[in-house]
Image (cartoon, rainbow, N blue to C red):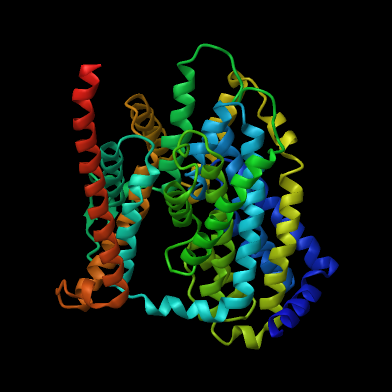
Amino acid sequence: MDVLHNLAFGFGVALTWQNLMYCAIGCTVGTLVGLLPGLGPLATISILLPLTYSIPTSGALIMLAGIYYGAQYGDSVSAITMKIPHASSIVACIDGYQMTLKGQTGLALFTAGVSSFIGGTVAIVVLSFFAPMLGEVAFLFGPADYCALMLVGFVCVSFVTTGSLLNGMAMCLVGVLLGQIGTDVNSGTPRFTMDLPFLADGVGLVSIALGCFGIAEITKNLDNRNERTPFNGKIHLIPTWSEFKRIIPSALRGSIVGSILSILPGGGPVIAQFAAYAVDKKVSKYKHEIGSGAIEGVAGQAAADEAAARTSFIPLMSIGIPENAVMALMMAAFIIKGIQPWPNMIAGHPDLFWGLVASMWVGNCFLITLNVPLVRYWLSVFKIPYAVLFPSILFFCCIGTYSVNSNLDDIYITAAFGFVGYVFMRLDMDPAPLMLGFILGPMLEENFRRALLLSRGHFSAFVARPISGTLLALIGIFIAWQVIAFFRQARRATADAPAAQLH
Protein backbone atom coordinates (compact mmCIF):
# COMPACT_ATOMS: atom_id res chain seq x y z
CA MET A 1 0.00 0.00 0.00
CA ASP A 2 2.93 2.33 0.64
CA VAL A 3 3.98 1.97 -3.00
CA LEU A 4 0.49 2.89 -4.23
CA HIS A 5 0.45 5.87 -1.90
CA ASN A 6 3.86 6.97 -3.17
CA LEU A 7 2.76 6.54 -6.80
CA ALA A 8 -0.30 8.67 -6.15
CA PHE A 9 2.01 11.30 -4.69
CA GLY A 10 4.26 10.99 -7.77
CA PHE A 11 1.37 11.45 -10.19
CA GLY A 12 0.45 14.58 -8.30
CA VAL A 13 3.91 15.91 -9.18
CA ALA A 14 4.01 14.59 -12.76
CA LEU A 15 0.54 15.74 -13.79
CA THR A 16 1.11 19.45 -13.20
CA TRP A 17 0.83 21.36 -16.46
CA GLN A 18 4.50 22.37 -16.39
CA ASN A 19 5.81 18.83 -15.92
CA LEU A 20 3.35 17.51 -18.51
CA MET A 21 4.75 20.04 -20.98
CA TYR A 22 8.36 19.08 -20.23
CA CYS A 23 7.47 15.37 -20.51
CA ALA A 24 5.82 15.94 -23.89
CA ILE A 25 8.83 17.95 -25.11
CA GLY A 26 11.24 15.25 -23.99
CA CYS A 27 9.25 12.43 -25.59
CA THR A 28 8.86 14.33 -28.88
CA VAL A 29 12.52 15.31 -29.06
CA GLY A 30 13.55 11.77 -28.12
CA THR A 31 11.40 10.26 -30.87
CA LEU A 32 12.84 12.63 -33.46
CA VAL A 33 16.36 11.87 -32.22
CA GLY A 34 15.63 8.18 -32.60
CA LEU A 35 14.41 8.68 -36.16
CA LEU A 36 17.60 10.42 -37.30
CA PRO A 37 20.43 7.94 -38.03
CA GLY A 38 23.36 8.27 -35.67
CA LEU A 39 22.01 11.10 -33.52
CA GLY A 40 21.35 9.30 -30.26
CA PRO A 41 20.21 10.45 -26.81
CA LEU A 42 23.78 10.81 -25.56
CA ALA A 43 24.62 13.64 -27.95
CA THR A 44 21.21 15.28 -27.54
CA ILE A 45 21.28 15.28 -23.73
CA SER A 46 24.85 16.61 -23.84
CA ILE A 47 23.70 19.54 -25.96
CA LEU A 48 20.62 20.26 -23.85
CA LEU A 49 22.25 19.76 -20.44
CA PRO A 50 23.05 23.51 -19.97
CA LEU A 51 19.32 24.27 -20.32
CA THR A 52 18.69 22.56 -16.99
CA TYR A 53 20.06 25.63 -15.19
CA SER A 54 16.98 27.64 -16.19
CA ILE A 55 14.36 24.86 -15.84
CA PRO A 56 12.80 23.73 -12.55
CA THR A 57 14.44 20.63 -11.09
CA SER A 58 11.59 18.16 -11.59
CA GLY A 59 10.82 19.49 -15.08
CA ALA A 60 14.47 19.28 -16.19
CA LEU A 61 14.90 15.69 -15.02
CA ILE A 62 11.56 14.63 -16.52
CA MET A 63 12.48 16.20 -19.88
CA LEU A 64 15.95 14.59 -20.03
CA ALA A 65 14.53 11.21 -19.04
CA GLY A 66 11.85 11.58 -21.74
CA ILE A 67 14.55 12.19 -24.35
CA TYR A 68 16.34 9.02 -23.28
CA TYR A 69 13.47 6.54 -23.28
CA GLY A 70 11.72 8.38 -26.14
CA ALA A 71 14.74 7.74 -28.34
CA GLN A 72 14.30 4.00 -27.74
CA TYR A 73 10.84 4.27 -29.33
CA GLY A 74 12.04 6.17 -32.39
CA ASP A 75 15.27 4.35 -33.14
CA SER A 76 13.43 1.27 -34.41
CA VAL A 77 11.97 3.22 -37.34
CA SER A 78 15.21 3.77 -39.24
CA ALA A 79 16.42 0.26 -38.34
CA ILE A 80 13.25 -1.41 -39.63
CA THR A 81 12.66 0.70 -42.73
CA MET A 82 16.23 1.33 -43.93
CA LYS A 83 18.44 -1.00 -41.87
CA ILE A 84 20.20 1.98 -40.30
CA PRO A 85 20.38 1.32 -36.55
CA HIS A 86 21.31 3.13 -33.41
CA ALA A 87 23.38 1.25 -30.86
CA SER A 88 20.21 0.06 -29.10
CA SER A 89 18.38 -1.07 -32.26
CA ILE A 90 21.02 -3.23 -33.95
CA VAL A 91 18.99 -6.41 -33.47
CA ALA A 92 15.92 -4.72 -35.00
CA CYS A 93 17.77 -4.74 -38.32
CA ILE A 94 17.61 -8.53 -38.48
CA ASP A 95 13.91 -9.40 -38.46
CA GLY A 96 12.56 -5.86 -38.77
CA TYR A 97 14.23 -5.20 -42.10
CA GLN A 98 13.26 -8.66 -43.33
CA MET A 99 9.64 -7.78 -42.60
CA THR A 100 10.15 -4.57 -44.59
CA LEU A 101 11.37 -6.56 -47.58
CA LYS A 102 8.21 -8.69 -47.29
CA GLY A 103 5.99 -5.60 -47.38
CA GLN A 104 5.18 -5.77 -43.66
CA THR A 105 6.77 -2.48 -42.59
CA GLY A 106 3.59 -1.16 -40.97
CA LEU A 107 3.15 -4.36 -38.98
CA ALA A 108 6.80 -4.27 -37.86
CA LEU A 109 6.54 -0.65 -36.68
CA PHE A 110 3.24 -1.32 -34.93
CA THR A 111 4.82 -4.32 -33.20
CA ALA A 112 7.79 -2.23 -32.10
CA GLY A 113 5.52 0.51 -30.73
CA VAL A 114 3.21 -1.81 -28.79
CA SER A 115 6.12 -3.90 -27.48
CA SER A 116 7.92 -0.75 -26.33
CA PHE A 117 4.79 0.26 -24.44
CA ILE A 118 4.64 -3.15 -22.76
CA GLY A 119 8.34 -3.04 -21.93
CA GLY A 120 8.05 0.45 -20.49
CA THR A 121 5.03 -0.51 -18.38
CA VAL A 122 6.70 -3.61 -16.92
CA ALA A 123 9.86 -1.62 -16.19
CA ILE A 124 7.88 1.09 -14.38
CA VAL A 125 6.28 -1.57 -12.16
CA VAL A 126 9.73 -2.99 -11.40
CA LEU A 127 11.10 0.48 -10.76
CA SER A 128 8.25 1.32 -8.39
CA PHE A 129 8.24 -1.83 -6.28
CA PHE A 130 11.84 -3.06 -6.36
CA ALA A 131 14.15 -0.06 -6.94
CA PRO A 132 15.69 0.07 -3.45
CA MET A 133 16.12 -3.70 -3.27
CA LEU A 134 17.37 -4.28 -6.83
CA GLY A 135 19.86 -1.44 -6.59
CA GLU A 136 21.78 -3.43 -3.98
CA VAL A 137 22.11 -6.40 -6.36
CA ALA A 138 24.81 -4.50 -8.27
CA PHE A 139 26.97 -4.57 -5.12
CA LEU A 140 26.98 -8.39 -5.23
CA PHE A 141 28.78 -8.48 -8.58
CA GLY A 142 32.56 -8.35 -8.62
CA PRO A 143 34.97 -8.28 -11.61
CA ALA A 144 35.01 -12.09 -11.85
CA ASP A 145 31.20 -12.16 -11.91
CA TYR A 146 31.04 -9.53 -14.65
CA CYS A 147 33.64 -11.48 -16.63
CA ALA A 148 31.49 -14.61 -16.45
CA LEU A 149 28.43 -12.57 -17.39
CA MET A 150 30.24 -11.27 -20.50
CA LEU A 151 31.10 -14.86 -21.45
CA VAL A 152 27.40 -15.69 -21.22
CA GLY A 153 26.87 -12.86 -23.70
CA PHE A 154 29.32 -14.46 -26.13
CA VAL A 155 27.29 -17.67 -25.95
CA CYS A 156 24.45 -15.64 -27.49
CA VAL A 157 26.38 -15.58 -30.78
CA SER A 158 24.79 -18.89 -31.75
CA PHE A 159 21.36 -17.25 -31.41
CA VAL A 160 22.08 -13.82 -32.88
CA THR A 161 23.73 -14.95 -36.11
CA THR A 162 21.45 -15.65 -39.06
CA GLY A 163 24.10 -17.64 -40.96
CA SER A 164 26.33 -20.54 -39.98
CA LEU A 165 27.73 -20.71 -36.47
CA LEU A 166 31.30 -20.68 -37.81
CA ASN A 167 30.69 -17.43 -39.67
CA GLY A 168 29.03 -15.96 -36.60
CA MET A 169 31.97 -16.84 -34.35
CA ALA A 170 34.41 -15.42 -36.92
CA MET A 171 32.48 -12.14 -37.10
CA CYS A 172 32.31 -12.00 -33.30
CA LEU A 173 36.09 -12.42 -33.13
CA VAL A 174 36.53 -9.59 -35.64
CA GLY A 175 34.39 -7.41 -33.38
CA VAL A 176 36.50 -8.31 -30.34
CA LEU A 177 39.68 -7.35 -32.24
CA LEU A 178 38.16 -4.03 -33.32
CA GLY A 179 37.32 -3.34 -29.68
CA GLN A 180 41.03 -3.59 -28.80
CA ILE A 181 41.92 -0.58 -30.95
CA GLY A 182 42.83 2.47 -28.88
CA THR A 183 44.72 3.28 -25.69
CA ASP A 184 45.03 0.57 -23.07
CA VAL A 185 43.15 1.69 -19.97
CA ASN A 186 45.63 0.17 -17.51
CA SER A 187 49.00 0.93 -19.08
CA GLY A 188 48.17 3.88 -21.34
CA THR A 189 49.88 2.13 -24.27
CA PRO A 190 48.39 2.63 -27.76
CA ARG A 191 47.20 -0.65 -29.30
CA PHE A 192 46.62 -1.29 -33.01
CA THR A 193 46.44 2.45 -33.74
CA MET A 194 49.05 2.33 -36.57
CA ASP A 195 50.37 5.64 -35.17
CA LEU A 196 47.18 7.40 -36.26
CA PRO A 197 46.13 9.97 -33.62
CA PHE A 198 42.39 9.69 -34.33
CA LEU A 199 42.48 6.00 -33.35
CA ALA A 200 43.88 6.75 -29.88
CA ASP A 201 40.37 6.72 -28.42
CA GLY A 202 39.38 3.63 -30.39
CA VAL A 203 36.71 3.12 -33.02
CA GLY A 204 33.27 4.47 -32.18
CA LEU A 205 30.27 2.18 -31.90
CA VAL A 206 28.18 4.62 -33.95
CA SER A 207 30.72 4.57 -36.79
CA ILE A 208 30.69 0.77 -36.99
CA ALA A 209 26.90 0.49 -36.69
CA LEU A 210 26.14 3.11 -39.35
CA GLY A 211 28.87 1.80 -41.63
CA CYS A 212 28.25 -1.95 -41.43
CA PHE A 213 24.46 -1.64 -41.50
CA GLY A 214 23.37 1.69 -42.98
CA ILE A 215 25.93 2.62 -45.62
CA ALA A 216 26.55 -1.04 -46.50
CA GLU A 217 22.82 -1.55 -47.12
CA ILE A 218 22.67 1.57 -49.28
CA THR A 219 25.65 0.35 -51.30
CA LYS A 220 24.05 -3.06 -51.70
CA ASN A 221 20.82 -1.51 -52.95
CA LEU A 222 22.74 0.45 -55.56
CA ASP A 223 23.45 -2.89 -57.23
CA ASN A 224 19.76 -3.07 -58.03
CA ARG A 225 19.03 -0.88 -61.04
CA ASN A 226 15.30 -0.98 -60.47
CA GLU A 227 13.75 2.14 -58.93
CA ARG A 228 12.10 1.23 -55.66
CA THR A 229 11.15 2.59 -52.27
CA PRO A 230 12.59 1.36 -48.94
CA PHE A 231 9.67 -1.03 -48.48
CA ASN A 232 7.26 -2.82 -50.77
CA GLY A 233 3.61 -3.73 -50.64
CA LYS A 234 0.59 -2.23 -48.94
CA ILE A 235 0.75 -0.87 -45.42
CA HIS A 236 -0.61 -3.59 -43.14
CA LEU A 237 -0.75 -1.86 -39.77
CA ILE A 238 -3.12 -3.64 -37.37
CA PRO A 239 -2.08 -7.24 -36.61
CA THR A 240 -4.51 -10.10 -36.69
CA TRP A 241 -5.45 -11.83 -33.45
CA SER A 242 -3.02 -14.69 -34.16
CA GLU A 243 -0.21 -12.18 -34.79
CA PHE A 244 -1.10 -10.23 -31.67
CA LYS A 245 -0.90 -13.43 -29.60
CA ARG A 246 2.67 -13.84 -30.86
CA ILE A 247 3.60 -10.28 -29.85
CA ILE A 248 2.52 -10.43 -26.18
CA PRO A 249 4.67 -13.39 -24.91
CA SER A 250 7.76 -12.13 -26.73
CA ALA A 251 7.28 -8.59 -25.42
CA LEU A 252 6.86 -9.86 -21.85
CA ARG A 253 10.00 -11.99 -22.10
CA GLY A 254 11.94 -9.03 -23.48
CA SER A 255 10.60 -6.80 -20.71
CA ILE A 256 11.86 -9.18 -18.03
CA VAL A 257 15.27 -9.57 -19.66
CA GLY A 258 15.70 -5.82 -20.12
CA SER A 259 14.60 -5.07 -16.56
CA ILE A 260 17.09 -7.55 -15.09
CA LEU A 261 20.14 -6.69 -17.18
CA SER A 262 19.82 -2.93 -16.86
CA ILE A 263 20.50 -2.92 -13.11
CA LEU A 264 24.08 -4.05 -13.78
CA PRO A 265 26.77 -1.45 -14.63
CA GLY A 266 27.66 -1.70 -18.31
CA GLY A 267 24.28 -3.16 -19.22
CA GLY A 268 21.38 -1.18 -20.58
CA PRO A 269 19.53 -1.36 -23.91
CA VAL A 270 22.59 -2.30 -25.99
CA ILE A 271 23.18 -5.57 -24.13
CA ALA A 272 19.51 -6.23 -23.38
CA GLN A 273 18.51 -6.36 -27.06
CA PHE A 274 20.94 -9.21 -27.81
CA ALA A 275 19.92 -11.15 -24.69
CA ALA A 276 16.20 -10.81 -25.44
CA TYR A 277 16.74 -11.93 -29.03
CA ALA A 278 18.71 -14.96 -27.84
CA VAL A 279 15.97 -15.91 -25.36
CA ASP A 280 13.27 -15.66 -28.04
CA LYS A 281 15.30 -17.71 -30.46
CA LYS A 282 15.55 -20.41 -27.85
CA VAL A 283 12.12 -20.59 -26.20
CA SER A 284 9.68 -19.12 -28.73
CA LYS A 285 7.16 -21.43 -30.40
CA TYR A 286 8.13 -19.79 -33.70
CA LYS A 287 11.90 -19.86 -33.17
CA HIS A 288 12.46 -21.43 -36.59
CA GLU A 289 11.11 -18.24 -38.20
CA ILE A 290 13.29 -15.83 -36.19
CA GLY A 291 16.00 -14.39 -38.40
CA SER A 292 13.86 -14.39 -41.54
CA GLY A 293 11.25 -11.77 -40.61
CA ALA A 294 9.42 -12.99 -37.50
CA ILE A 295 7.32 -10.75 -35.28
CA GLU A 296 9.09 -12.12 -32.21
CA GLY A 297 12.42 -10.80 -33.49
CA VAL A 298 11.00 -7.27 -33.36
CA ALA A 299 8.78 -7.52 -30.27
CA GLY A 300 11.34 -8.96 -27.85
CA GLN A 301 14.06 -6.51 -28.85
CA ALA A 302 11.79 -3.45 -28.65
CA ALA A 303 10.42 -4.43 -25.23
CA ALA A 304 13.87 -5.16 -23.81
CA ASP A 305 15.19 -1.90 -25.25
CA GLU A 306 12.48 0.18 -23.59
CA ALA A 307 12.49 -1.75 -20.29
CA ALA A 308 16.26 -1.39 -19.99
CA ALA A 309 16.05 2.36 -20.64
CA ARG A 310 13.60 2.77 -17.75
CA THR A 311 15.24 0.50 -15.20
CA SER A 312 18.67 1.99 -15.96
CA PHE A 313 17.61 4.63 -13.43
CA ILE A 314 17.59 2.04 -10.61
CA PRO A 315 21.36 1.90 -9.91
CA LEU A 316 21.60 5.68 -10.42
CA MET A 317 18.87 6.72 -8.00
CA SER A 318 19.23 3.92 -5.44
CA ILE A 319 23.02 3.57 -5.04
CA GLY A 320 24.36 6.54 -7.02
CA ILE A 321 26.14 4.50 -9.73
CA PRO A 322 25.48 5.43 -13.39
CA GLU A 323 25.45 2.24 -15.45
CA ASN A 324 26.08 3.81 -18.86
CA ALA A 325 27.12 7.10 -20.45
CA VAL A 326 23.58 8.50 -20.65
CA MET A 327 23.03 7.79 -16.96
CA ALA A 328 26.30 9.60 -16.23
CA LEU A 329 24.84 12.68 -17.93
CA MET A 330 21.64 12.26 -15.91
CA MET A 331 23.78 12.14 -12.78
CA ALA A 332 25.40 15.39 -13.90
CA ALA A 333 21.90 16.91 -14.21
CA PHE A 334 21.12 15.82 -10.63
CA ILE A 335 24.36 17.35 -9.36
CA ILE A 336 23.72 20.59 -11.27
CA LYS A 337 20.49 20.86 -9.33
CA GLY A 338 22.31 20.25 -6.05
CA ILE A 339 21.06 16.66 -5.59
CA GLN A 340 23.45 13.81 -4.96
CA PRO A 341 22.01 10.44 -6.11
CA TRP A 342 22.55 8.08 -3.18
CA PRO A 343 20.62 5.45 -1.21
CA ASN A 344 18.91 8.14 0.86
CA MET A 345 17.65 9.98 -2.23
CA ILE A 346 14.33 8.14 -2.26
CA ALA A 347 13.64 9.17 1.33
CA GLY A 348 15.26 12.60 1.08
CA HIS A 349 13.69 13.70 -2.23
CA PRO A 350 10.48 11.66 -2.63
CA ASP A 351 8.95 14.30 -4.90
CA LEU A 352 11.77 13.90 -7.44
CA PHE A 353 11.97 10.10 -7.30
CA TRP A 354 8.26 9.31 -7.41
CA GLY A 355 7.54 12.24 -9.73
CA LEU A 356 10.11 10.89 -12.19
CA VAL A 357 8.71 7.35 -11.92
CA ALA A 358 5.14 8.57 -12.50
CA SER A 359 6.27 10.75 -15.43
CA MET A 360 7.68 7.64 -17.11
CA TRP A 361 4.22 6.13 -17.29
CA VAL A 362 2.81 9.44 -18.55
CA GLY A 363 5.60 9.50 -21.12
CA ASN A 364 4.77 5.93 -22.08
CA CYS A 365 1.24 7.07 -22.94
CA PHE A 366 2.59 10.06 -24.85
CA LEU A 367 4.92 7.85 -26.87
CA ILE A 368 2.41 5.19 -27.88
CA THR A 369 0.03 7.98 -28.91
CA LEU A 370 2.80 9.70 -30.82
CA ASN A 371 4.15 6.61 -32.55
CA VAL A 372 1.49 3.98 -33.21
CA PRO A 373 -1.31 6.16 -34.73
CA LEU A 374 1.28 8.10 -36.74
CA VAL A 375 2.96 5.03 -38.25
CA ARG A 376 1.28 5.69 -41.61
CA TYR A 377 2.65 9.23 -41.61
CA TRP A 378 6.15 8.05 -40.71
CA LEU A 379 5.95 5.61 -43.62
CA SER A 380 4.77 8.30 -46.03
CA VAL A 381 8.06 10.10 -45.42
CA PHE A 382 9.96 6.99 -46.46
CA LYS A 383 7.92 6.52 -49.66
CA ILE A 384 10.54 8.60 -51.42
CA PRO A 385 12.42 7.07 -54.37
CA TYR A 386 15.90 5.93 -53.48
CA ALA A 387 17.38 8.36 -56.01
CA VAL A 388 16.24 11.17 -53.71
CA LEU A 389 16.49 9.32 -50.40
CA PHE A 390 20.10 8.11 -50.81
CA PRO A 391 21.78 11.53 -50.42
CA SER A 392 19.51 12.38 -47.46
CA ILE A 393 20.35 9.14 -45.64
CA LEU A 394 24.06 9.59 -46.21
CA PHE A 395 23.83 13.19 -45.03
CA PHE A 396 22.15 12.22 -41.76
CA CYS A 397 24.62 9.36 -41.26
CA CYS A 398 27.49 11.83 -41.57
CA ILE A 399 25.81 14.35 -39.27
CA GLY A 400 25.07 11.67 -36.67
CA THR A 401 28.62 10.34 -36.77
CA TYR A 402 30.16 13.80 -36.55
CA SER A 403 27.89 14.89 -33.68
CA VAL A 404 29.29 12.25 -31.29
CA ASN A 405 32.83 13.65 -31.02
CA SER A 406 32.75 16.61 -33.46
CA ASN A 407 35.56 14.87 -35.33
CA LEU A 408 35.72 14.72 -39.11
CA ASP A 409 37.83 11.55 -38.97
CA ASP A 410 34.82 9.66 -37.63
CA ILE A 411 33.09 10.21 -40.99
CA TYR A 412 36.03 8.63 -42.80
CA ILE A 413 35.94 5.67 -40.40
CA THR A 414 32.20 5.27 -41.03
CA ALA A 415 32.78 5.29 -44.79
CA ALA A 416 35.51 2.65 -44.40
CA PHE A 417 33.21 0.39 -42.39
CA GLY A 418 30.52 0.99 -45.00
CA PHE A 419 32.81 -0.64 -47.56
CA VAL A 420 33.75 -3.42 -45.12
CA GLY A 421 30.09 -4.04 -44.34
CA TYR A 422 29.27 -4.23 -48.03
CA VAL A 423 31.97 -6.87 -48.49
CA PHE A 424 30.55 -8.81 -45.55
CA MET A 425 27.07 -8.72 -47.10
CA ARG A 426 28.39 -9.96 -50.44
CA LEU A 427 30.06 -12.84 -48.59
CA ASP A 428 26.86 -13.58 -46.61
CA MET A 429 28.57 -12.65 -43.34
CA ASP A 430 26.10 -11.29 -40.78
CA PRO A 431 27.39 -8.09 -39.09
CA ALA A 432 25.24 -8.52 -35.94
CA PRO A 433 27.74 -10.88 -34.19
CA LEU A 434 30.48 -8.36 -35.00
CA MET A 435 28.61 -5.72 -33.02
CA LEU A 436 28.12 -8.16 -30.14
CA GLY A 437 31.85 -8.90 -30.02
CA PHE A 438 32.75 -5.21 -30.29
CA ILE A 439 30.50 -4.34 -27.33
CA LEU A 440 31.40 -7.23 -25.04
CA GLY A 441 35.11 -7.61 -25.90
CA PRO A 442 36.46 -4.53 -24.07
CA MET A 443 34.16 -5.17 -21.10
CA LEU A 444 35.37 -8.77 -20.86
CA GLU A 445 39.04 -7.73 -21.04
CA GLU A 446 38.65 -4.99 -18.43
CA ASN A 447 36.89 -7.20 -15.89
CA PHE A 448 39.20 -10.17 -16.60
CA ARG A 449 42.31 -8.13 -15.88
CA ARG A 450 40.74 -6.49 -12.84
CA ALA A 451 39.75 -9.88 -11.41
CA LEU A 452 43.29 -11.22 -11.85
CA LEU A 453 44.78 -8.14 -10.19
CA LEU A 454 42.52 -8.55 -7.16
CA SER A 455 43.26 -12.29 -6.92
CA ARG A 456 47.03 -11.80 -7.47
CA GLY A 457 46.92 -13.82 -10.66
CA HIS A 458 44.99 -16.82 -9.35
CA PHE A 459 42.41 -18.11 -11.84
CA SER A 460 40.56 -19.84 -9.04
CA ALA A 461 38.80 -16.53 -8.36
CA PHE A 462 36.51 -17.21 -11.33
CA VAL A 463 35.15 -20.46 -9.88
CA ALA A 464 35.41 -19.66 -6.16
CA ARG A 465 32.79 -16.90 -6.23
CA PRO A 466 29.20 -18.27 -6.25
CA ILE A 467 27.90 -16.02 -9.04
CA SER A 468 30.77 -16.46 -11.48
CA GLY A 469 31.08 -20.17 -10.69
CA THR A 470 27.38 -20.71 -11.39
CA LEU A 471 27.51 -18.76 -14.64
CA LEU A 472 30.60 -20.66 -15.83
CA ALA A 473 28.90 -23.96 -14.98
CA LEU A 474 25.86 -22.94 -17.03
CA ILE A 475 28.14 -22.05 -19.94
CA GLY A 476 29.82 -25.47 -19.69
CA ILE A 477 26.44 -27.24 -19.66
CA PHE A 478 25.26 -25.26 -22.68
CA ILE A 479 28.42 -26.00 -24.68
CA ALA A 480 28.22 -29.72 -23.82
CA TRP A 481 24.57 -29.77 -24.83
CA GLN A 482 25.37 -28.07 -28.15
CA VAL A 483 28.17 -30.56 -28.88
CA ILE A 484 25.90 -33.52 -28.11
CA ALA A 485 23.17 -32.07 -30.33
CA PHE A 486 25.70 -31.60 -33.15
CA PHE A 487 26.88 -35.24 -33.01
CA ARG A 488 23.30 -36.50 -32.83
CA GLN A 489 22.42 -34.49 -35.89
CA ALA A 490 25.51 -35.74 -37.73
CA ARG A 491 24.74 -39.35 -36.79
CA ARG A 492 21.14 -38.94 -37.95
CA ALA A 493 22.30 -37.49 -41.26
CA THR A 494 24.72 -40.39 -41.72
CA ALA A 495 21.98 -42.93 -40.99
CA ASP A 496 19.56 -41.27 -43.44
CA ALA A 497 22.10 -41.15 -46.28
CA PRO A 498 21.95 -44.92 -47.19
CA ALA A 499 18.16 -44.84 -47.08
CA ALA A 500 18.11 -41.88 -49.46
CA GLN A 501 20.46 -43.74 -51.85
CA LEU A 502 18.16 -46.78 -51.90
CA HIS A 503 15.23 -44.65 -52.95
Kindly identify the residue that appears in the image at 37 percent across and 53 percent down: 439
Q: Quadrant of residue 137?
A: bottom left
Question: In the rendered view, does 503 fall on the left or right side of 205?
Answer: left
Q: How many marks?
A: 0
x, y (%) of residue 434?
A: 34, 43
Kindly identify the residue that appears in the image at 64 percent across and 67 percent down: 124
Kindly identify the residue that appears in the image at 33 percent across and 68 percent down: 146
Kindly identify the residue that appears in the image at 72 percent across and 44 percent down: 372
x, y (%) of residue 392?
A: 59, 29
Which quadrant is the C terminus positioned in? top left
293 vs 448, nearest the viewer: 293
The residue lying furthest to the top in this view is: 225
Question: In the rendered view, does 283 fall on the left or right side of 77?
Answer: left
Question: In the rendered view, does 343 fall on the left or right side of 209?
Answer: right
Question: In the rendered view, does 189 fall on the left or right side of 397?
Answer: left
x, y (%) of residue 20?
A: 80, 64
Q: Is residue 297 visible?
A: yes
Q: Quadrant of residue 460?
A: bottom left
Which quadrant is the N terminus positioned in? bottom right
x, y (%) of residue 393?
A: 56, 31
Q: Is residue 185 visible?
A: no
